[in-house]
């Protein structure tokens, strides 16, 4: 097919879903423009260290994704934000932050997620106490090869707080972010690899280990690493004169309140619809669900389709999902896009 006859697709977002979708669409013969708002592609994957369940180095996955998008049919443009989408006949026009109007035959939104801003749960003390950090901060420490308190000391007693910003009506997020339980298990084990004698506690509401080999990882974390799981909600965090954290927890299994002194507390921040996705939803009349993620046209048969003809979804802009599911969802969008092209040409 001559290049001018090929379908033009704009993929918005250069994280795992966007890179995979762009690569697959290019291999299916489409001419793809990939727009990424940051200065480089890779999304959240580039900030992570190891991935569950097989503790694979995230750089391996990142290299694969970048290779996927390294194709003659793909133009990657970084530092460009999509402002709105507009239908014009069969085309979809993407208006960008640079004042351009990119005319396309279809658009794939892969705007991903933002991590919940832990400052919104003031009672946990993020950004108030130096040694209260987020799961993302801990990954940076793993990447740098050293887990330390703010004063340079190696922490000996570390706690993980589950469900930060998820399953919480106070922040209007009733949904489960699905990944933070297994991330806590993985990170707790990694802490023990860094600091052999550390005592590690996870404060959870329920352990939701719904993925392949997650339950096995949970078991291993208890039997081989001695991670202690306490079913209970952290109600308050403060610090003492030695700058140790005082954590109050209601142990709901034992039915008694606990007061623990810890050196470091890690908040398992949940996933939320990205700000860039929200802006596009508002500017382009794309439907969102109760959880504020993009609402797919049909949960069973059309999770990649939107309410706008020619506009499709890939990955975590529709719901929390792990990288495996994100890549599968991004691959699936190709079937919907090519079906759509067949139908509009029929
Ligand atoms: S995956 Fe676990 S930590 Fe995350 S929201 Fe669900 S129950 Fe809470």
Image (cartoon, rainbow, N blue to C red):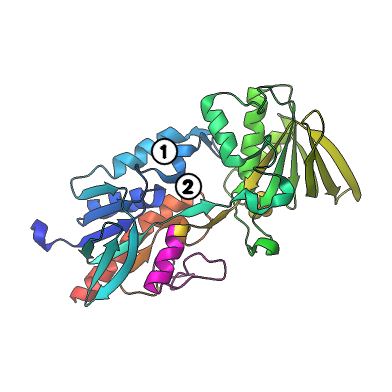
Main SS category, magenta section: loop
Quarter-wise, where is residue 159 in the image? top right
| Residue, far left | 2
As helix, strand or loop, the secondary structure at mark 1 comes to helix
| Residue 279 appears left or right of 254 | left
In the rendered picture of this protein, how many numbered marks are placed on residues? 2
Residue 201 falls within the magenta-colored stretch: no
Image quadrant holding the C terminus, namely bottom left
Do the residues under discs 2 and 1 have CB atoms within 8 angstroms? yes
Image quadrant holding the N terminus, namely bottom left
As helix, strand or loop, the secondary structure at mark 2 comes to helix
Q: Earlier in the sequence, mark 2 or mark 1?
A: 1
Q: Is residue 289 above or below residue 163?
A: below
- Residue 101 appearing in the image: yes
Q: Position of residue 262 (x, y in %)?
A: 78, 33
Q: Which residue is mark 2?
A: 323
- What residue range appears in magenta? 276-305
- Alpha-carbon span between mark 2 and mark 1: 9 Å
Q: Which residue is mark 1?
A: 61
Q: Residue at x 59, y 43 (%)?
A: 213
Q: Position of residue 245 (x, y in %)?
A: 77, 36
């Amino acid at each position: 097919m001559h290049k001018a006859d090929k379908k033009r697709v704009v993929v918005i977002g250069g994280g795992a879903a966007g890179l995979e979708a762009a690569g697959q669409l290019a291999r299916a013969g489409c001419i793809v423009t990939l727009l990424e708002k940051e200065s480089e592609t890779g999304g959240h994957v580039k900030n992570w260290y190891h991935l569950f369940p097989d503790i694979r180095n995230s750089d391996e996955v990142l290299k694969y994704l970048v290779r996927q998008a390294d194709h003659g049919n793909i133009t990657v443009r970084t530092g460009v934000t999509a402002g709105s989408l507009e239908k014009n006949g069969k085309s979809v026009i993407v208006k960008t932050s640079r004042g351009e109007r990119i005319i396309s035959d279809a658009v794939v939104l892969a705007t991903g997620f933002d991590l919940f801003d832990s400052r919104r749960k003031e009672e946990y003390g993020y950004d108030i106490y130096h040694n209260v950090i987020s799961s993302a901060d801990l990954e940076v420490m793993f990447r740098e090869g050293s887990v330390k308190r703010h004063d340079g000391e190696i922490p000996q007693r570390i706690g993980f707080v589950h469900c930060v910003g998820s399953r919480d009506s106070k922040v209007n997020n009733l949904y489960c972010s699905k990944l933070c339980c297994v991330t806590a298990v993985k990170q707790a084990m990694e802490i023990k690899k860094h600091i052999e004698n550390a005592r590690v506690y996870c404060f959870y509401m329920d352990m939701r280990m719904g993925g392949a080999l997650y339950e096995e990882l949970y078991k291993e974390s208890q039997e081989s690493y001695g991670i202690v799981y306490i079913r209970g909600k952290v109600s308050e965090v403060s610090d003492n004169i030695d700058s140790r954290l005082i954590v109050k927890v209601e142990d709901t299994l034992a039915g008694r309140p606990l007061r623990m002194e810890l050196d470091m507390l890690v908040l398992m921040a949940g996933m939320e619809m990205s700000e860039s996705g929200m802006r596009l939803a508002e500017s382009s009349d794309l439907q969102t669900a109760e959880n504020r993620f993009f609402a797919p046209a049909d949960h069973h048969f059309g999770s990649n389709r939107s309410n706008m003809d020619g506009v499709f979804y890939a990955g975590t802009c529709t719901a929390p999902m792990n990288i495996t599911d994100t890549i599968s969802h991004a691959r699936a969008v190709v079937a919907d896009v090519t079906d759509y092209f067949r139908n509009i040409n029929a």
